[in-house]
Image: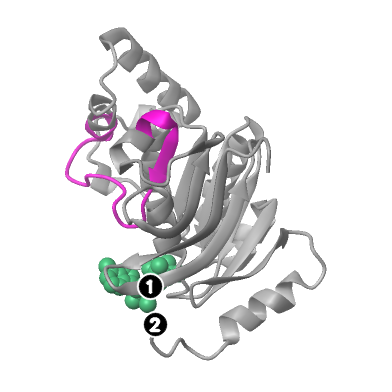
Amino acid sequence: MAGDVLEVRSVTSGYGDLTVIREVSLSVAPGQITAVLGRNGAGKTTTLKTIAGLLPVNHGEVIFDGQTITKSPAHSRRGMGFGYVQENKRIFKSRTVEENLVLGLYRLGLARQEEQHRLDEVYERFPILAERRRQTAGYLSGGQQQMLAIGQALLNRPRLLMLDEPSTGLAPSIVSEVMQTVQRLRDEGLAVLLIEQAVEAALRVADSVVVLDVGRVVHTGSSSDEGLRAIIQDAYMASPPSGRS
Ligand code: ATP
């Protein structure tokens, strides 16, 4: 749709000869959270990796800010305004908080003064990271590590933030803290694509929802749609996938 930051049109992708997602379409608008839900193995991470350019698009199109970027390499997407927080690849645990952020900055090739400015922005947003800047990241709580990973992605001032299961491994009270952060970013105008297995946490913050099952979109709509929970339940309860090709 016009005005969307990201539009994925009928994308098919996978790993080598293995097709995992088929004809997936979704969109994310500025100031909106789109949640992609689906059980284990539904193809959520594969969808994100394809959008980020880490997996090739076999059919279909990826459009960012009105421009087709289907074949642009992953590194060039960062410069376009993609922020991507991958599951389990969040941070360097043996480095300090500040070192993690500086490593993120280094890739951006900014002038020294601008680097400091971006660092200050992250510290302003997450005061706990400023407080713990000299602490080894592995000693932060799970929620703080997630904040650090999000902070790293924000150094680039992205227009689209993609989060892969930010709730994984976190206690429920910490999940809501992380989700509040995501909501604040949305309220500031960021387009957010949120991949989640934690349905309730995602539905509390999402504006729109895409439900995936065995690599296909089985529902797209508003998070307040009547009947959405029944659709999600069906997708989570369906019999396990019996092989893909
Ligand atoms: P989860 O919540 O478990 O991460 P998901 O919905 O994100 O699930 P994907 O990780 O996208 O699902 O996986 C979808 C399918 O792709 C699974 O059948 C998985 O086995 C397969 N798959 C994932 N990564 C690879 C890979 N590197 N090589 C081959 N197949 C893969």
Disc 2 to disc 1, C-alpha distance: 7 Å
Residue 218 rendering spot, x and y as whole percentages: 63, 73
Lateral position of residue 168 relative to residue 76, left or right: right
Camera-nearest residue between 218 and 31? 218
| Residue 93 on the magenta span | yes
Q: Is residue 8 visible?
A: yes
The CB of the residue at mark 2 lies under 8 Å from ligand 1: yes
The residue segment tinted magenta is: 78-101
Residue 61 rendering spot, x and y as whole percentages: 49, 51
Q: Residue furthest top?
A: 113
Residue at the spot of label 2? 244
SS label for mark 1: strand
Name the residue rendered at 26%, 42% in the picture. 137
Q: Is residue 168 visible?
A: no
Lateral position of residue 160 relative to residue 229, left or right: left
Residue 29 rendering spot, x and y as whole percentages: 64, 41
Name the residue rendered at 55%, 54% in the picture. 9
Mark closest to the chain's N terminus, 2 or 1? 1
Amino acid, disc 2: Arg
Q: Are marks 2 and 1 in contact (CB under 8 Å)?
A: yes
Camera-nearest residue between 85 and 58? 58
Residue at the spot of label 1? 19
